[in-house]
Amino acid sequence: AESYGGGRVDAGEDVAARQLGVRESLLESEEQEAEARARAAVNMSRMLASGGSDVLKRIPEDILPLLLRLPSAEGDVEALKRSAEGVNAWKDNLARGLLPDVDVEWPEDATFREALIEALGDLDMARFTRRF
């Protein structure tokens, strides 16, 4: 069991941690990966404890473990729900060959979101995502 954020988490028994284990890490070190997994497990536990299980059930399994790693998830079911809606909006737009709408409030940081959308536009990424 690991201690993180004031709570003890056995990452080996947590659903989110198991799901995270099947994805290749984008983090630089095993220590960072372990910390991200622990954060996801704590966030999931907090959400379940606060009655957020209905929201968690509606978030696709392929993105839930990754969203639980976000600092904004910190037990905030509504923030997690907004993030899931944002990811889905991005996926839907890109699948149709369109850039995501700037009004979609994900990622949360507006400056980063606008820069990312601009970079995707400069790379003509929407055309490629629609094609493939």
Image (tube, rainbow, N blue to C red):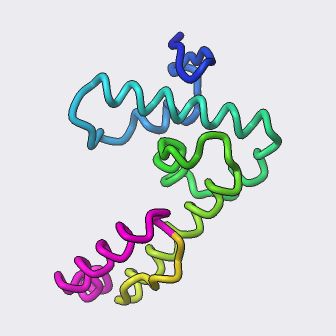
Q: Residue furthest left?
A: 123
Identify which residue, 72 or 127, lies in the foreground. 72
Residue shown at 56%/16% (left/top)?
10
Secondary structure character of the magenta stretch overall: helix
The magenta segment is 106-132
Residue shown at 30%/22% (left/top)?
31
Q: Residue furthest front?
A: 111
Residue 118 included in the magenta stretch of the image: yes
Quadrant housing residue 85: bottom right
Residue 72 included in the magenta stretch of the image: no
Quadrant housing residue 42: top right
Image position, residue 51 (x, y; %)? 82, 42
Image position, residue 6 (x, y; %)? 61, 18
Q: Residue furthest right?
A: 51
Image position, residue 69 (x, y; %)? 48, 42
In the image: residue 132, left or right of residue 21: left
Residue shown at 38%/25% (left/top)?
34
